Image (spheres, grey):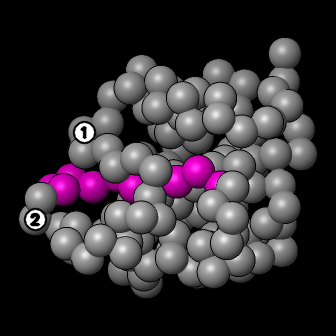
Amino acid sequence: MESSNNNNYYILLVDDEKDILDLFSEYLSSNVFNTISFQNPMEALNYYYQNQSNCSLVITDYKMPQMSGLELIKKIREKDIDYKIKTIVISAFIKDNLPYDKSYFLTVDKILEKPVYLDRLKKVVQELISTIDIPQKA
């Protein structure tokens, strides 16, 4: 787990690829977003359960060994029944990988296809964050 910045709200980043996780975390942190990063979705879920009131956004890879990003979001939604937490799923092959079960898509705010360019990620994060009240570091 790696954390950055010091406000109480955080973006939960989950990707089993450390290089991508580090890149997203460093970039978002440099743009004054507080991030908490995990390579293991089970560890991320446990952290979320203990800190759910401060989570504002989840960004997760779709395909990971322990559990898919959609399964992770589904478990988060079991606690976040009001859908206050915004969610982004990132996948290399959207059409081939993601299931066609509409119940999954109702739990996801945005789906981004790899490669994800950093300026695009920042724009989507800003759009989603702007819909909720989160104090940001000046």
Query: From the viewer's perspective, is the residue at label 2 or at label 1 nearer?
Result: 2
- Residue flagged by tag 1: what amino acid is it? Pro
* Prevalent SS, magenta region: strand
SS at badge 2: helix
Residue extent of the magenta highlight: 85-94
Q: Residue 91 or 39: which is nearer the viewer? A: 91
Residue 115 tag number: 1
Tag 2 near tag 1, CB within 8 Å: no
The N terminus - image quarter: bottom right
| Residue 101 image offset from top left, x and y in percent | 26, 76
- Locate the C terminus and report the quarter of the image it occupies: top right
Amino acid type, residue under disc 2 in the picture? Asp
Residue at the image position 19 percent from the left and 72 percent from the top: 100
Q: Is residue 34 above or below residue 103?
A: above
Q: Is residue 100 left or right of residue 83?
A: left
The residue lying furthest to the left in this view is 96
Which residue is label 2 attached to? 96
Neighbor class of circle 2 (other Cα within 10 Å; few <14, some 14-19, many 20+) is few
Q: Which mark is residue 4?
A: none
Say few, some or many: other residues with alpha carbon within 10 Å of mark 1 (under 14 / 14 to 19 / 20 or more): few
Tell me residue 84's x, y (percent): 69, 55
Secondary structure under the numbered disc 1 in the rendered image: loop
| Residue 50 showing in the rendered view | yes
Image point 63% across, 61% down: which residue?
Answer: 83
Is residue 89 found inside the magenta-colored segment of the image? yes
Q: Residue at x 25, y 45 (%)?
A: 113
